Image: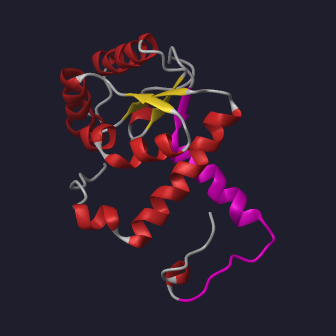
Amino acid sequence: MFARIARPTSSWSRSPRTCRYQDCISRKWSAEITAQGWKHVGLLGTQWTMTGPVYAKALEKRGLKHSIPEGSMREKLNTAILEELCQGIFSAPTTKLFLEAIEDLGSQGADCVILGCTEIPLIITSANSPLPVLDSTRLLAKHAVLEALNDRPIPIQSGWLGGSQGAEC
């Protein structure tokens, strides 16, 4: 159902277009976090998402503290995402694993948790999570729809979304 995607290379994660895209996404969820008055964010996702620089830098830039699960839990979550959720396998033990990770993040002081992987919201929602959740995919989709419905023109300089200039998001 879902294809596995290889971890981005360091050159991919530093490209200007990718950095603009990542910054656009981080602005949307960080605005939601600050609007709610949350100061400490838990982060779930693949191993790369949880330990990589994208979320850490974006949260730090906005003065927000963040926590991720400890090493062995990160490995279990990563395996569950890639070998179960991405394969369309949704089991009660896997849901329980994610809920335990969220509870642990809460005990570390997290006020909310970012579901930083498109598959996690298939088993974790605001209805079953012990902490408020931010589904990064839905949040970005919501803002994309709002932007599409906006009557103002999108400032595109040239090429796909303005080449090096890009559109504001």
Colour scheme in the image? secondary structure
Total marks placed: 0
**Is the residue 149 above or below the residue 139 in the image?**
below
Q: Residue at x 29, y 66 (%)?
A: 12
**Outermost residue toward the right?**
151
Give percent across and percent down for residue 20.
48, 65
Q: Residue at x 29, y 21 (%)?
A: 94
**Is the residue 75 above or below the residue 148 in the image?**
above
Instruction: From the viewer's side, name the closer residue of 89 and 127.
Output: 127
The magenta segment: 133-158
Instruction: From the viewer's side, name the closer residue of 91 and 63.
Output: 63
Q: Residue at x 65, y 53 (%)?
A: 143
Give percent across and percent down for residue 91.
30, 22
Does the rendering let one see residue 118? Answer: no
Does the rendering let one see residue 68? Answer: yes
Q: Was residue 94 drawn as part of the magenta stretch in this picture?
A: no
* Left or right of 83 in this view: 149: right
Instruction: From the viewer's side, name the closer residue of 131 and 79.
Output: 131
**Outermost residue toward the bottom?**
158
Instruction: From the viewer's side, name the closer residue of 26 and 143.
Output: 26
Give percent across and percent down for residue 137.
50, 46
Q: Was residue 146 drawn as part of the magenta stretch in this picture?
A: yes
Q: In which quarter of the image is the C terminus?
A: bottom right
Determine which quarter of the picture holds residue 127.
top right
Give percent across and percent down for residue 105.
41, 18
Q: Residue at x 50, y 57 (%)?
A: 23
Determine which quarter of the picture holds residue 166.
bottom right
**Is the residue 14 above or below the residue 70 in the image?**
below
